[in-house]
C-alpha cells in the first residue's frame, strides 16, 4: 500500500491537477457543449478507461527503474517535478488561448471509442504519471509495483469523478459557454499557477524521500 503519511498530500495534489483543463478535459468539455451531458459522460468513460493503460505502464516501468537504480529513480522524481513547473511556465507565457472545437453529432458508442483513444494515446497523460506518481512512492515499504498501481487507480477514480462533473456542467451550460470567450482566455493563468505549485510541492516531496 502507498505510504499513509503522504496519502493526504497525494489526494490534494491529485485534485488540484485534475482541475487543470488539459487536453482530455477540453475534449470532454467540448463534446459536452456540442452534444449534451450524455455524450459528455460517454467521453469521460472512454478517456478514463484509456488512462488505465498509463497506470499499468507506469507501475511496470517506474518499478523497473527503481529496482535497477535508486539514484536513477530519484533523478526521475526530480525531473518530473521540473516538468510540472515547466508546463506551468509554458502555460503562463503562452499566447494561445484554449477554446472548444466545433464537433459534429456522433453516436454514443463512437464517442466512447474516441475518448478511449484520447486517454490511451495522449503522451501528456503518460508523462504526468511518470512525473507525478513517483513523488508519493516510498521504496522502503516494499511492494513498489503495488504502490504505483494503487496510486494510479486512486488517481483515475478521482479523475472519473471530476471529469464527470466537468461533463455535466458543460452539458448543462453549453449554450452559455459557447459564447463566453473570457472563460477560455483566463483559464491558462489558473492552469499555469496550479502546475507550478504542484511542481514545487513535488520537488519538496522528492527531497524528503531521497534517502
Image (cartoon, helix red, strand yellow):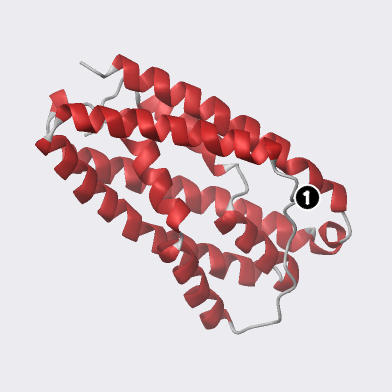
Which residue position is annotated with label 1? 184
Using the rendered image of the protein, determine whether residue 143 is visible from the camera's viewpoint: no
State the residue at coordinates (45%, 69%). Answer: 116
On screen, 119 above or below 189? below
Looking at the image, residue 79 lies above or below residue 100: above
Q: Can residue 127 be seen at all in this image of the molecule?
A: yes
| Quadrant in which the N terminus is drawn | top left
Q: Secondary structure at mark 1?
A: helix
Identified at 19% across, 50% down, the residue is 60
Q: Could you say which quadrant of the image residue 123 lies in?
A: bottom left
Where residue 47 appears, x then y in whole percent? 48, 63
Image height of 10 relative to 167, above or below = above
Q: In the displayed image of the protein, which residue is found farthest to the bottom?
A: 107
Q: How many marks?
A: 1
Query: Where does residue 167 sit, x and y in percent of width and height?
Result: 64, 59
| Vertical order, 55 against 151 (above or below) | below
* Image position, residue 18 (x, y; %): 54, 43
Give percent across and percent down for residue 49.
40, 63
Badge 1 density bin: few <14, some 14–19, many ≥20, Cα 10 Å: few
Report which quarter residue 195 is drawn in.
top right
Quadrant of the frame with the C terminus? top left
* 175 horizontally vs 139: left or right: right
Name the residue: 36% across, 28% down. Answer: 78
204 on left or right of 111 = left
Q: Quadrant of residue 56?
A: bottom left
Of 37 and 9, nearer the camera is: 9
Amino acid at each position: 500500500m502507498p505510504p499513509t503519511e503522504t496519502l493526504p498530500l497525494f489526494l490534494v495534489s491529485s485534485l488540484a491537477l485534475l482541475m487543470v483543463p488539459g487536453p482530455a478535459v477540453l475534449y470532454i468539455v467540448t463534446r459536452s457543449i456540442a452534444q449534451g451531458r450524455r455524450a459528455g459522460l460517454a467521453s469521460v468513460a472512454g478517456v478514463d478507461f484509456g488512462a488505465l493503460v498509463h497506470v499499468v505502464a507506469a507501475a511496470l516501468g517506474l518499478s523497473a527503474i527503481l529496482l535497477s537504480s535508486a539514484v536513477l529513480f530519484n533523478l526521475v522524481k526530480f525531473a518530473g517535478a521540473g516538468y510540472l513547473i515547466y508546463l506551468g511556465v509554458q502555460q503562463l507565457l503562452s499566447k494561445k488561448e484554449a477554446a472548444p472545437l466545433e464537433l459534429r453529432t456522433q453516436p454514443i458508442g463512437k464517442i466512447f471509442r474516441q475518448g478511449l483513444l484520447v486517454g490511451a494515446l495522449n503522451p501528456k497523460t503518460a508523462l504526468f504519471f511518470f512525473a507525478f506518481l513517483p513523488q508519493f512512492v516510498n521504496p522502503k515499504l516494499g511492494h513498489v509495483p503495488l504502490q504505483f498501481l494503487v496510486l494510479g487507480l486512486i488517481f483515475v477514480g478521482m479523475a472519473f469523478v471530476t471529469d464527470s462533473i466537468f461533463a455535466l456542467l458543460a452539458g448543462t451550460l453549453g449554450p452559455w459557454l459557447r459564447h463566453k470567450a473570457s472563460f477560455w482566455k483566463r483559464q491558462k493563468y489558473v492552469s499555469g499557477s496550479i502546475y507550478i505549485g504542484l511542481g514545487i510541492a513535488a520537488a519538496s516531496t522528492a527531497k524528503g524521500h531521497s534517502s
